[in-house]
Image: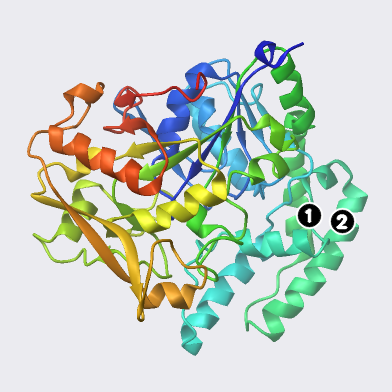
Amino acid sequence: MTQQDRGRNVVVIGTQWGDEGKGKVVDWLTDHAGGVVRFQGGHNAGHTLVIKGKKTALQLIPSGIMRDGVACYIGNGVVVDPSHLLLEIERLEAAGLEVRSRLFISESCPLILPFHVEIDRAREALRESSGAGKIGTTGKGIGPAYEDKVARRALRVQDLKHPERFAKKLRELLELHNFVLKGYLHAEALEFQPIFDHAMKVAEQLKPMLADVGVRIAEINQRGANVLFEGAQGTLLDIDHGTYPYVTSSNCVAGNAAAGSGVGPDKLHYILGITKAYTTRVGSGPFPTELPIDEAGTIGHHLSTVGQERGTVTGRARRCGWLDAAALKRSILINGVSGLCITKLDVLDGLSEIQVCVGYQLGAERVDILPLDADDIVACRPIYESFPGWSDSTAGVTQWEQLPLNARRYLERVQEIVGAPIDMVSTGPDRDHTILLRHPYKA
């Protein structure tokens, strides 16, 4: 069988600090895919889809679940809170979707358990009270669950199939975490039995959905089906390559689509980088192009209100600023981006002037790419290039030629600065509000 006979695979990643609109793009591309894979993160990430005017928020389940007949996979790189997963399934079923026959969960996924959540929240509270400053986690136990994974002590989904093994490992793990909760974080200890009983209860519902995800992906590829790998968060929140320590606890970059799902990197054929036409960030950490958002009439307030910039999971207001092309260059380098999709272009409608950060002044030096050290990023002063804005609406436009001339010139200059082609433009939240210049599955 030749490669032409096999399925083609696309990886969708965020190139900024998350919230770039990946869910809508994944949903659009799923029309050409037989399977969608989530390969990292947990339910700290969220995708909001708008289909025929109706909003649906997803956190763990891949966006492909909104398409009939598409298989959805949760890969081994994802940490799973089983209670949350079942609630999400039930919510989708209540909306009339068939989920359980199409959702496959890797047995190797680490579990998020109640003590992970308690540790996460108690740590943030301790950092705040001590003046150290909060990291800005969602408090959902993601980081502590990944810590157990790396320490080789995690309870994994496969342990749910073996009650005695699960109980033994749970007792040992709970003893350790209760010691930390009481002795260091000054929080309440948790009891074994309620955690064990609930885990065994949810296990019965999860067992039919457990699978060897890597093998299943290989099988549908061999049958000619395309697969879409769906990243969560954004590159600049990556545990290795982001603005450490103000990052998430997993690898958000395209290379982890292989490790986080059980396929070889040669199966990742095209990398689509999702990039908001401006920049946002939720939580703490450096943000060179940040603008104040509280004062009405300012650019920051415009981006925040017109863009409806609040976190899908937390509801926190997102920090907003101009597009940072120097940071985008770093993301393109790390991910090996094949093409970009620019989202929320319509939020810039009506602005008389638009700016793009093309580099930074760092002390006496000019740098043209985001530095690796968060302290250096804090010291960076953005260097801007200005563009005339446009008054005509871009909302819902589906053809490149229909965009205002200044909007086209803005996008053309962005791709010139960052050195990557813009293959798609999203002009609104609905799946049909899309300009296609080069199709990722046909490139």
Residue located 21% across and 52% down the image = 303
Report the side of 82 relative to 17 (left or right). Answer: right
Foreground pick, 441 / 143: 441
Report the side of 76 relative to 47 (left or right). Answer: right
Q: Can you identify the residue that label 2 sits on?
A: 167
Report the side of 139 relative to 205 (left or right). Answer: left
Residue located 42% across and 31% down the image = 25
Amino acid on which disc 2 is placed: Ala
Amino acid on which disc 1 is placed: Phe
Question: Eyeballing the image, is 312 above or below 113?
Answer: above
Q: Residues within 10 Å of mark 2 (few under 14, many from 20)?
A: many
- Mark 2 to mark 1: distance in Å? 7 Å
**Residue 239 screen position, x and y as percent:** 60, 61
- Can the viewer see residue 417 in this picture? yes
Question: Eyeballing the image, is 196 above or below 200?
Answer: below
**Residue 246 screen position, x and y as percent:** 50, 68
**Residue 370 screen position, x and y as percent:** 44, 63
Under circle 2, the secondary element is: helix
Q: Are marks 2 and 1 in contact (CB under 8 Å)?
A: yes
Residue located 54% across and 82% down the image = 126
Image color mode: rainbow
Outermost bottom residue? 130
Q: Residues within 10 Å of mark 1 (few under 14, many from 20)?
A: some
Q: Quadrant of the N terminus?
A: top right
Under circle 1, the secondary element is: helix
Q: Can you identify the residue that label 1 sits on?
A: 196
Question: Eyeballing the image, is 422 above or below 177?
Answer: above
Query: Upstream in the sequence, badge 2 or badge 1?
Result: 2
Foreground pick, 127 / 226: 226
**Residue 189 screen position, x and y as percent:** 70, 74
